[in-house]
Image (cartoon, rainbow, N blue to C red):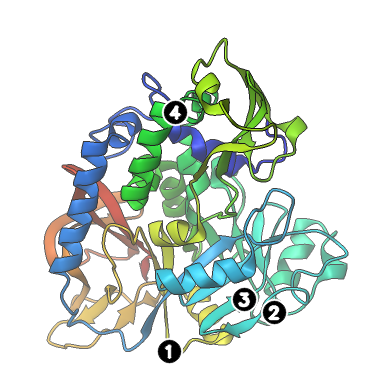
Amino acid sequence: MWRNWDRFALAAIVWTASAGAMAGAPGMSPGRKWTTQARMEAPHLKAATEDAAKYAAAREPVALQSGLNDYRTILHAHAEDSSHTGGTRPEMLADAKKAGVSCIMLTDHFRPPKDFINDSWRGLHDGVLFIPGSETNGFLVYPTESILDKMDLPNEQLIPEVTKNGGLIFLSHLETKYNHPMTGLTGIEAYNRHADAMDDAMALMQLSSVITDPKRYAEFSAALEAYPDAMLATQLDYPTLYMMKWDRDSQEQRVVGVAANDCHHNMVMICKMVDADNVLVGTIVDDDDGMYKFDSANSPGIKEMTQGRQPGDILASLDLDPYYLSFHNESTHVLAGELTEDAIRDALRNGHAYIAHDWMCDPTGFVYGTQQDGTEGLAGLMGDEIAASPTLQLVAEAPVACDYVLIKDGAEVSRAHGREFSYKPDGPGVYRLEAWLNVDTEDRPWIYTNPVYIR
């Protein structure tokens, strides 16, 4: 079914499943209290949205300063690059401005002879920086110049071609690559929207009972319009497998973690009339012969929907992944001195970045690093390597009070609540910090920092 639909889009839509379809049981993610099905109910969507508004009202300036700017950046983004991509670059630009995104690092699907570096957007477009790249061979690749003639090389030869002269390469879709070696790579996708969606991919066909039933369609459409951020976040889980790989591999080498939106704007579901008793259900990127056919004998609501309409009419549609919504749900915050391609590349290479689910609360200004006792300035920033010292402490500050969890070499070593965090490390190790917020009475992950490497 829907053979042209990207597997991320295919899975992500599952949270429209009908009653009885469980998209993730409580306990599969730390802090999770509600099933995805329960989170989709109007009272829970309303509560989550109201809590996010309370956090927004409570934001305060952060006193601890990095001396760098916080640029909201999107990695793993698709536009005009395949038959299963529904969005355009102008649409992406408009939604980036709406979402407060400063930089988009494109990942065109590799389609020779099109050159994903020279035939794409690059540089500032109406204030938003675009950096071209490609999703290929299981990686997000961002070379600094065209490598079109190198793309057929085996990975051990391709990787140094990508990273030459400041290029970046991240391992993508870790759910299928847990034991993939990190040799030569810049880092990994430490969070991927696709993986969250796949956790819930249990009842795809039940979507038909939403979009082919006028009453349920109206209810879902109203909820989607009223609570779009909370609706997309119903699947949000702690990415346990991703974090395990990140923690394990970062003990062997520096591994930069980024968020992967994997956005295409192709999750626009449609119900299309065939005749008075039959409809097709699919997406805007599907041909008719790639969609599923449903009849009124099994879905009685179809009769009501087709009344007075003509074959070929779109009877219902659900736009579930506009770029704005994806950009607002998660992003990579890059700490850099200026909004230029070189500065963004350098900051990412050095791990001066953190991942955030921005919809819960704008984290801009958040900082995590090291201080020496008796000093006010930072001695190091997330991503940095610093020598162990008895006077060294790890420090962080967020714009709202949150629950901090400090991870050393893959094991929790400290918890704290508040806007500020400090911890005196007991020796060398890889120290990664998480920040959590309570939303709709659940603890949900908000921020994942790149580690501080104490040697």
Q: Amino acid at mark 3?
A: Ile
Left or right: 452 in relation to 7: left
The quarter of the displayed image where residue 154 is located: bottom right
Report the front residue among 314 and 46.
314
Question: On the image, numbered disc 1 is attached to which residue?
Answer: 337
Q: Earlier in the sequence, mark 3 or mark 4?
A: 3
Question: Regarding mark 4 in the picture, which secondary structure is present there?
Answer: helix
Numbered disc in front, either 1 or 3: 3
Question: On the image, numbered disc 4 is attached to which residue?
Answer: 214
Left or right: 424 in relation to 282: left
Question: How far apart in space, not on screen, are marks 2 and 1 (Cα)?
Answer: 19 Å
Numbered disc in front, either 1 or 4: 4
Question: How far apart in space, not on screen, are marks 1 and 4 (Cα)?
Answer: 52 Å
Question: How far apart in space, not on screen, are marks 2 and 4 (Cα)?
Answer: 51 Å
Q: Amino acid at mark 2?
A: Thr
Question: On the image, numbered disc 2 is attached to which residue?
Answer: 144
Q: Amino acid at mark 1?
A: Gly
Q: Earlier in the sequence, mark 2 or mark 4?
A: 2
Residue in the image at 54% along x and 20% along y: 303
Question: Regarding mark 3 in the picture, which secondary structure is present there?
Answer: strand
Residue in the image at 37% along x and 65% along y: 451
**Residue extending furthest top?**
297
